[in-house]
Amino acid sequence: MIAIASVGALGGLCQWLAWKFKLPSILFLLTAGILVGPVFGIFNPDEFLGDLLFPIVSIFVAIILFEGGLTLKLKDIRGHGRVVRLLISIGVILTWLLIATTVHYLFDMSWSLALVFGSITVVSGPTVVKPLLRAVRPSDKVAHILHWEGILIDPVGVFLALLVFSFVVLDAPDVGFAHISIILIKLVVIGGGIGLAAGAATALVLRRYLVPDYLVNVLTLVTVVCAFVLSETLQHESGLLAVTLMGVWLANARGLHIDEILHFKEDLSVLLISSLFILLASRVDISVIPQYGWQILALLVIIQLVIRPLNAWMCTIGSGLSYSERAFIGWLSPRGIVAAAVSSVFVLRLQELEIPMAELLVPLTFSVIIGTVVFQSLTAKPLADKLGISNPEPNGVLFIGANEIAVKLATALSEHSITVMLSDSSWRNVREARQAGLPAYHGNATSGHASENLELQGIGKMVAVSANRDSNALASMHFRSEFGSSLVFTLEGTSEDEAYERFDTANRNRANPLFDASLSYGGLSKRLRNGEIKHLTIPENVDKVVTPAVTEDAEPEEENRTDASPEDNEKNLGTAEPETEKGKIATDPYNTDHEDPAIGSKIIDTVDETLSAAVDGVAGEEDEDEDVPAEPETMSEPLYNDDDLKLFAIDKDGQLYIYGAGERITLKAGWTLIVLSPNKN
């Protein structure tokens, strides 16, 4: 149990480090596995799992490939251009043959094993490409091509590897070519047939709602495992093909919504990838690497500087891409989880058959993975900057709503060259926003049309200020995965006030409160009409100005708390205000739905407050440790008044901070503070 918990904890730590440093998680996972395995000898998966190692690794790989198949939609191949199609077809064949030829002559490896190694290392994969693209932010066309190449090449590469591996396994002196051809046909027919049948059956069950929603993910997972086992039982090495095709079928089935399944499988794949990499890396025999030191280095150089550039250059001929864009595509192709997992599965079988030099397959594959990931992680960003194809940091704001609030806030940000985009279903609002010189999308920002046509280049935050709180909540849910929970804001965001539980969208479906937790649509609209947006520059004689986080205990504004516009707020529609319910709760002796919090809740709240105070204290100490004057000069007049509503802060580099994320913002000299000040009459 300790070993299981340790692997899980180590995997979680590696994933967090990858997120923190914006690097592929595979880099940290492989390093951790090698350290706890062959380096320090803390963990030995063969002793820990015994005969279960091969089945567990095989099933883990099957689930990961199924999740990859779920992301493969046939229209994506048609919709993403000739370059992607060439990279995953001719490019795969070219890379396979060149790598096989290289390892054959460098390592004096048999052609059969060299072809297996080449087929394994043709794939890159989204698990390593996506983090690099997020960190580098290349031009749209380049990112578009590399992203879809990484997704589409996984099943293509696996299919190639399975065919080559099956041919090598069956290539015995007493086995004729006709027999080998029959076995390969059986592999394709059985694996393909079971995969397509399982996908069709699952789609039918889901489409007709034959199982309840809470069992959908369980049913799908069980079906994947059963399809894999059945296919492997009928024909060895056909299971991976079966689960990949099952995922592809579900991804392309009409009238079937697989978002929940895909999200579940993505979360599960993170856990499986973390565990699998640590398991596999801890089995690597690093003692053979020094024996082939210069050969491994030569292989990495040839893959990085010859094979990939040649492949990309040939596949982008006549594409209209610039030389810089073609050069960057020819630079980025890190190997990932599929190569590591498939090589580990294959080597167990090859060693059983006593294939010469089979023990070199895994160390060599892991060397290629680590080498390409490390080298490209360190060089991709500087190269993109040098080639002039990097996009700026996504610092802009998407406004949900193009009403007067959004127009005034977006105009204030535009004065500081902050990219903005407004979205509204009202043509009148969109027209007025465009007349004000602001880009605006006419339609629902969460629609399918918006996913393909709403321009989000340079956008990294969302602010929902529409008149409808439910629309704001829906947009928050939709863009939370796009921008991150900490960068999504809405009027009347999450609150612990029980008085609004029955009237408002649940907290889990809402975003961070915008500017102030108690601020409503009508309240902000009124303050904008009766106030002035000011742009204040923090003077050089001020050390720091610490502005607190949004407080959750603020009393909600009594005016204008409706989903309607300010004009509708002036009309009394007879709807009971939440404050009235709150008063009723306080005075009704028979109301037992809102009792005082239990002692357990009080303890939890106390602990939360203590921890928050401790974190703020540590942050304060870190600020004090910086090289600053001990007693900075104070201004004769305050920078802003207590009545001013703090909206945005912009640092010297143009980085935008939005008030309302629940964290302190420390203003420094040279920063710009945007506030909403009431007019003094």
Image: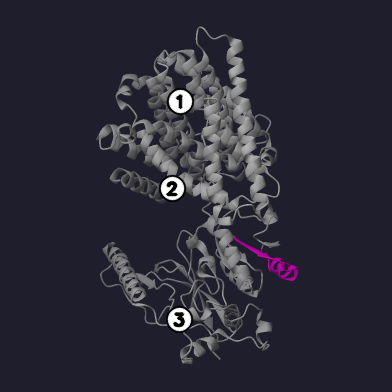
Q: Give the range drawn in magenta.
A: 420-438
Q: Name the residue under label 2.
A: 22
Name the residue: 56% across, 75% down: 504
Q: Mark 3 points at which residue?
A: 554
Q: What distance separates the C-alpha of mark 2 from that of mark 3?
A: 36 Å
Q: Nearer the viewer, residue 196 or 671?
A: 196
Helix, strand or loop status at disc 1? helix
Q: Is residue 603 above or below residue 83?
A: below
Location of residue 154 in the rendering, given as x and y in whole percent from the top left corner: 55, 34
Local packing at callout 1 (Cα closer than 10 Å; few below 14, some 14-19, many 20+) is many
Location of residue 12 in the rendering, given as x and y in whole percent from the top left corner: 38, 49
Do the CB atoms of the residues marked 2 and 1 lie less than 8 Å apart?
no
Is residue 422 a member of the stretch shown in magenta? yes
Res 353 quadrant in image: top left
The amino acid type found where label 3 is placed reads Ala
Is residue 543 a member of the stretch shown in magenta? no
